[in-house]
Image (cartoon, rainbow, N blue to C red):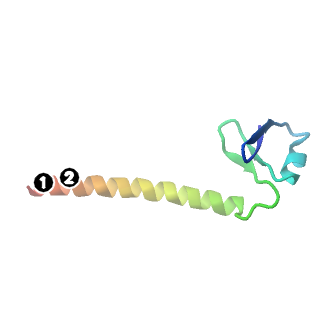
Amino acid sequence: MKATKGNKVYSVDETNKAFYVGQGYDIVDDDGNVIEQGVGKKVDLKKYNDLKEKLTKLVKENKDLKDELKKAKKDAQ
C-alpha cells in the first residue's frame, strides 16, 4: 500500500495507515485504486467511485454509438 498526497508518496502498512489517513493522505493499493480517502477531502470516495464507473460506461456507450453511426453512414452510400 502507498499513502499519496500531492506529489508525495510513502509506502505504508496496516500499522501506520491510520496516521497517514489522519494527515490527509489517500491510501492506494498496488494497482493505484484508492482504498481509503484521507481526512479533509471534499468529494466522498463512494460518490467518486460511482461517478467514475458511470463515466466509464458512458464513454464506452458513446464509442459504440459513434461506430454504429459511421457504419450506418457507410451503408447509406
Image quadrant holding the N terminus, namely top right
Residue at the spot x=36%, y=53% of the render? 63
Q: Is residue 67 left or right of residue 32?
A: left
Residue 4 position (above or below residue 63): above
Q: Residues within 10 Å of mark 1 (few under 14, many from 20)?
A: few
Q: Is residue 10 left or right of residue 32?
A: right
Query: Looking at the picture, which amino acid does disc 1 mark?
Result: Asp
Tally the numbered discs: 2
Residue to which mark 1 is pinned = 75
Residue 27 lies, in percent from the top left, at 77, 45
Residue 54 lies, in percent from the top left, at 52, 60
| Figure quadrant of residue 52 | bottom right
Residue 71 lies, in percent from the top left, at 20, 52
Helix, strand or loop for disc 1? helix
Residue at the spot x=70%, y=48% of the render? 34
Helix, strand or loop for disc 2? helix
Q: Residues within 10 Å of mark 2 (few under 14, many from 20)?
A: few
Residue to which mark 2 is pinned = 71
Residue at the spot x=16%, y=57% of the render? 73
Q: CA distance from mark 2 to mark 1?
A: 6 Å
Query: Looking at the picture, which amino acid does disc 2 mark?
Result: Lys
Q: Are the two marked residues, 2 and 1, in contact with CB atoms closer than 8 angstroms?
A: yes
The disc placed on residue 8 is: none
